[in-house]
Image: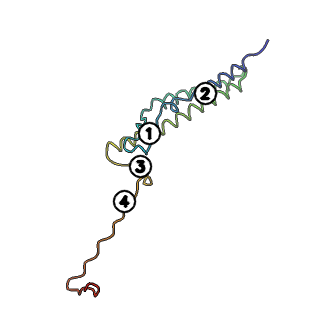
Amino acid sequence: MKNHFAPRLTLVLAAMLSLPACSFLFVTPPREQYGPRHGNCTSSLAAPGVDFLFGALNGLAAVYVATQDEVRYRYQLVGVGATVGALWLSSAIYGIHNTQQCAALLQDDELGTSAHPAWLHPAPPRLRPAPVPPPPGARPPLDAE
């Protein structure tokens, strides 16, 4: 009898890794070149929340399978679960970082303030100081005559 589990495991792993997590697909990061609108970035935490949920479930499933003694292909299943869980959790981190940054930029736009790093803002032009007037009763310089 031929074992068909290994090819199926490979197909499942390939399918899971080819389907990116929600945040990689649906979170639009803020873009400074668009000015005050920031490119209509995503400020909702829905996609990162789903990513975190699936990542945690994959991690817990991998730990559960690792503790079981009677599971065939235990190490392969733990490896697949940990890899897919890491993919989902990395997507959650990416999504949370970009949605928080977007929310802060949008709040800055509403308040009219700026929390952008100083290196993103051009320095204002330096003005030459006004000449100091001569004290009262002083003679004009010889050049002025």
Mark 3 or 1, nearer chain start: 1
Residue 12, x across and y down, in percent: 65, 22
* Residue 12 numbered tag: none
Q: What amino acid is at disc 1? A: Gln
Q: CA distance from mark 2 to mark 4?
A: 48 Å
Which image quarter is the N terminus in? top right
Mark 2 or 1, nearer chain start: 2
Q: CA distance from mark 2 to mark 1?
A: 27 Å
* Residue at image location 44% in from the left, 32% down from the top: 45
Mark 4 or 3, nearer chain start: 3
Q: Quadrant of residue 11?
A: top right
Nearer to the camera, 89 or 39: 39
Q: CA distance from mark 3 to mark 1?
A: 13 Å
Q: Taking 21 as reference, is 82 left or right?
A: right
Mark 2 or 3, nearer chain start: 2
Residue at mark 3: 116
Residue at mark 1: 100
